[in-house]
């Protein structure tokens, strides 16, 4: 019969490996998102607007 401590250690190792794989996937996704954001024009402004007037100027305020 197998020792319960060995089973628990083996299961913990599998869980740890799974979490590491998920972490690598998320890191890869983040790198892809950062690369794409550098390619998309206007995806991130050089400086955020500082006043309400600057924020409002960015909206289309045509009367309906």
Image (cartoon, rainbow, N blue to C red):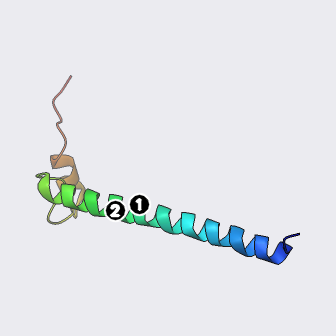
Label placed on residue 28: 2
Q: Quadrant of the N terminus?
A: bottom right
**Left or right of 64, for residue 21:** right
9 up-or-down from 35: above or below: below
Q: Position of residue 57 (x, y in %)?
A: 15, 48
Q: Do we see residue 4 in this rendering? A: yes
Q: Position of residue 53 (x, y in %)?
A: 19, 54
Q: Quadrant of the C terminus?
A: top left
Numbered disc 1: secondary structure? helix
Mark 1 sits on what residue?
Answer: 25
Numbered disc 2: secondary structure? helix
Which residue of the protein is positioned furthest toward the top in this rendering? 64
Residue in the foreground of this view, choosing between 26 and 13: 13
Residue in the foreground of this view, choosing between 16 and 34: 16
Q: CA distance from mark 2 to mark 1?
A: 5 Å
Residue at image coords 64%, 72%: 13
**Left or right of 42, for residue 3:** right
Picture quadrant of residue 10: bottom right
**Left or right of 15, for residue 4:** right
């Amino acid at each position: 019969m197998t020792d319960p401590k060995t089973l628990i250690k083996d299961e913990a190792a599998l869980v740890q490996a799974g979490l590491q794989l998920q972490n690598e996937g998320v890191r890869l996704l983040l790198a892809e998102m950062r690369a794409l954001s550098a390619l998309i024009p206007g995806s991130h402004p050089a400086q955020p607007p500082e006043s309400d007037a600057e924020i409002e100027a960015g909206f289309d305020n045509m009367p309906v």
